Image (tube, rainbow, N blue to C red):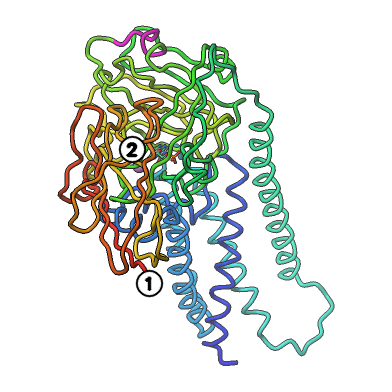
Amino acid sequence: MKARRLGSLYGPLATLTGVSAGHLIAALNSSWASPIVSLGNRIIDHVPSEVKTLVIKLFGTKDKLVLIASILVVVFVISIFVGRLYMTGKARMAYAVIALMSLAAGGAALLDARSDLLSLTPAFFSGAVSIYALRWLGQQSESHDNSDVVLSRRDLLKTIGIIGAVSIAATGAARLLAQKASVQVERIKIALPKPLKFLARPPLDPALSTPGLSTFYTSNEEFYRIDTSLVIPNISTDDWTLEIVGMVENPRTFTYAELSAREVFELDGTIACVSNEVGGDLVGNARWLGVRLDDLIREASPTSEADQIMGYSQDGFAAGFPLATLDGRDAMIALGMNDEVLPLAHGFPARIIVPGLYGYVSATKWLTRIELTRFDQKHGYWISRGWSERAPIKTQSRIDTPLNGGELPPGTLAIAGVAWAPIRGISKVEIRIDNQPWRTATLSPEFAKTTWRQWWIDWSPEEGTHLISVRATDGDGELQPEDYVPVEPNGAEGWHTIQVQVLK
Ligand SMILES: Nc1nc2c(c(=O)[nH]1)N[C@H]1C(S)=C(S)[C@@H](COP(=O)(O)O)O[C@H]1N2
Ligand SMILES: [Mo]
């Protein structure tokens, strides 16, 4: 094979080895991140919000996978170039490019809120292993006709190096797996505290008799997931505390045991992402179990200057909302979701849930600190990225069935979906087919103004193409606006409209 060809193979192989080594060594210390993850995190932090919106629109909750894949593709392309340089006698330049990549990853790691100089280790290690692997591969293709059995000093060093790297990597891999497994096991063993009184259960779910309609409760597995974390934080309750600090007279710290020993209550609540498009699925309804947030804040006694409650997560994310939002509504620090201990992906051990506010200004997952502060002093994660500081959930309604673009058999069928406007509630949902007058849909009973309501209507269509629109009226009698408004800066508006084809 030509040297250049070989180089295109060796380069990616060498970087792959280096990247994996960095990934594994990152597991040795919980505040280190894999070089690719560090890069990804900085990209997420700095990506313009139009791009974020576009990526979510295109890839939905697969956005992180797409990001990681894109970084890997870029690294792959660069390493082809590196391999070619190396194999065509420009070894120094090849090393320099690898060093630059490590530097970029190291810089990204250093910019992490929780980092120190040692967090450069994974990037540095990645670079060193890549160079080592490249040299090794290069040597393999040199002519090997001298069957020299004596171990030279160089070979000895090489052997020590390989054994060293492999054992460090193996330890890293073992730790990574053990850490993840132990938090999973720990979570399964936790018994949720019991509320003084359990909320009533809604009777038969209309979704049972209407295929395609969302169930009243969204299961934890199906619940949408949106966050800036490339790797779900694995937090053991042993190392976890919740601090309530800032403009308060009595700063407090709670362990997991102390928090769960408090009185807990249940809340049926729909949460939504501000990036949810008209008709989108970044919304879900769950039965949450948690501790009253207003009690905790009252006990901490905010000073008169405080006007914002900021929740910080273990990974540096922050979301803030007005202190005045705590107007008696059932805001909580949630420990449970749908009768289970909070899943890792949804914020274990604890997160904030505030009925009526979009997630990005309120629903901090992996919560470790609550700070009482002022809007003119501190901003949550998304605020400097162009999103509104105050963001109540807008009234939205969605057609779940039939599907947009669907081809339907003749006969009677149900048009059905969900509508939500926490905490105002939903008072009416109407459907319009083509240019006919609006028809009022049947609504599922209202259990709480904090949840969505399912709705449905029977339809016996004629053959042909039909347009179906939905609109909701909230509990204050306010009709959902018709004109389309994009998700940025504070949530989409508009009537969800679909087109279907009814067959003969
Ligand atoms: N730590 C952390 N918490 C977070 C976020 C995040 O990026 N990091 N994203 C918020 C956003 S934008 C939303 S919409 C909700 C989504 O919660 P879910 O993933 O449990 O559905 O979490 C909020 N809490
Ligand atoms: Mo969100």
* Spot occupied by residue 121 in the image (x, y as percentages of width and height): 54, 49
Quadrant of the image containing the C terminus:
bottom left
Residue 381 lies in the magenta stretch: no
Q: Nearer the viewer, residue 449 or 117?
A: 449
204 w.r.t. 123: above or below: above
Q: Is residue 96 visible?
A: no
Can residue 460 be seen at all in this image of the molecule? yes
Q: Position of residue 366 (x, y in %)?
A: 48, 33
CA separation, marks 2 and 1? 47 Å
- Please identify the quarter of the rendering in which residue 187 is found: top right
- Tag 1 secondary structure: loop
Q: Which residue is mark 1?
A: 504
**Residue at point 54% right, 87% down?**
5
Segment tinted magenta in the rendering:
296-302
Residue on which the image places disc 2: 360
Question: Relative to residue 229, is residue 330 depicted above or below?
Answer: above
Image quarter for ligand 1 equals top left
* Residue type for callout 1: Lys
